[in-house]
Amino acid sequence: MNGRNRTQHREDALLVLADGTRFEGEAVGAVPEGGVTTGEAVFNTVLSGYQEVLTDPSYAGQVIAFTYPHIGNYGVNPTDDEAVRPHCRGMIVRSLTDRPSSWRSTESLESFLVRFSIAGITGIDTRRLTRHLRDHGAMPCAFGTAGEAELVAAAAAAVPTDGQDLVSTVTTAESYRRGHGPYRVVAYDFGIKEAMLRQLGELATITVVPASTPADQVLGLEPDGVFLSNGPGDPAALPAIIDEIRALASDGTVPVFGICLGHQLLSSALGATTYKLPFGHHGGNHPVQRLSTGRVEITSQNHNYAVAEGSLTSAEVTHVNLNDGVIEGIASRHSPVFSVQYHPEAGPGPHDARYLFEEFRLLMDATGARRRTGANG
């Protein structure tokens, strides 16, 4: 049988936020030594796709609270993994399904958590928790089976993602190849998702490189385009990476396409500043307007940091979030580079913004033709 038997007892657990707010629940998943798990608590509003969320490397350092009340209904399967293992610190849910029902399921969500040593807590009033994080902002937390005093102390000592280089904890150690398309793309792995590699792989043969790869080494591979992936943490904590992206953008001969953290890093390379949102954008239903057409796209998002309005001097804003006006896309005025804050590749969706990969292809076509013309001239 997948998962726990419905009559099996779960150990009492407690969730404590850094401001001392407490929530009672029950322990699920792996139980860490000492019975304490810490991380930055954020909430995600997706109705489905919990496996894609849990395995997204962008959640490194964070504990994910799902607002949808029933999680685990359809189990998990290897196809939906966005990385070889989850990088999040833990999971918070209202109700964890004991017996998943789906023809695609190969194991229960709880056994998946146990297999990867990820702790969780269920029975939490996630509506109250979400309202608290919405009003007071994402904050560190501690949860587990340890005593209340120990959890309160752990929550107070836990650190947020501010100023942390979390990319170095999730990036690949060595380059590797993916895809089968006719173009050549070098993809920086800041925490790259499998869904991104699938989309790019239809266009190009991809060389995925570590986050610290120098720009001249990337250009030495003679790519048709460079891709900047998603990833976790504070972009301001990555000045060396920003310098390399600045070199790529200023080269002006190779198109650059960034998503999520890649968008923040590219914007920073173009002179922008970034800041931390109060509780971030984490969900699958954020409305974004494409300014050139007025068209509204429903998008998947996962970011705690954003590009500051008015700080871009060498690029134009191409997309904005209709909920709060956050910059969602930019394009350079001088080089063939562009980026978006949201996730056009998102699995299971929405897919409104998949056209951006075609925009990247068209840009590679155009700049490739110019390079060939210049060489022949």
Image (cartoon, grey):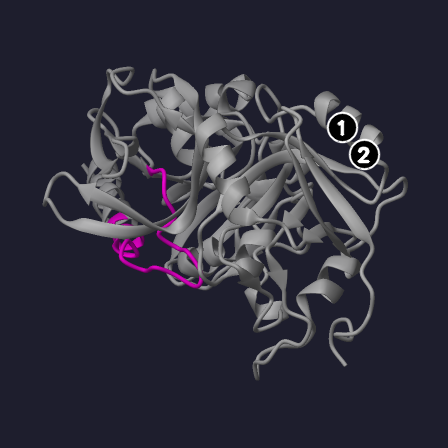
How many numbered circles are shown? 2
Q: Is residue 7 magenta?
A: no
Mark 1 residue type: Val
* Range covered by the magenta-colored residues: 340-359
Q: Position of residue 357 (x, y in %)?
A: 31, 53
Q: Position of residue 42 (x, y in %)?
A: 54, 39
- As measured in the structure, the alpha-carbon distance from the residue carrying label 1 to the one carrying label 2 is 6 Å
Cβ atoms under marks 1 and 2 closer than 8 Å: yes
Q: Which mark is residue 148?
A: 2
- Mark 2 burial class by Cα count in 10 Å: few <14, some 14-19, many 20+: some
Residue 189 seen in this snapshot: no
Residue at (50, 25) in percent of width and height: 235
Q: Which mark is residue 152?
A: 1
Q: In this rendering, would 330 be left or right of 72?
A: left
Q: Position of residue 40 (x, y in %)?
A: 62, 33
Given residues 204 and 279, the one toward you in this image is 279
Q: Position of residue 17 (x, y in %)?
A: 65, 31
Tell me the element at label 2. helix
Given residues 26 and 319, the one toward you in this image is 26
Q: In this rendering, would 180 be left or right of 314?
A: right
Given residues 55 and 16, the one toward you in this image is 16
Q: Which mark is residue 204?
A: none
Q: Quadrant of residue 273?
A: top left
Q: Look at the magenta stretch and give its main secondary structure.
A: loop
Residue 193 drawn above or below residue 136: below
Given residues 92 and 123, the one toward you in this image is 123
Residue 74 drawn above or below residue 50: below
Tell me the element at label 1. helix
Mark 2 residue type: Glu
- Mark 1 burial class by Cα count in 10 Å: few <14, some 14-19, many 20+: many
Residue that protrudes farthest toward the right in the picture: 33
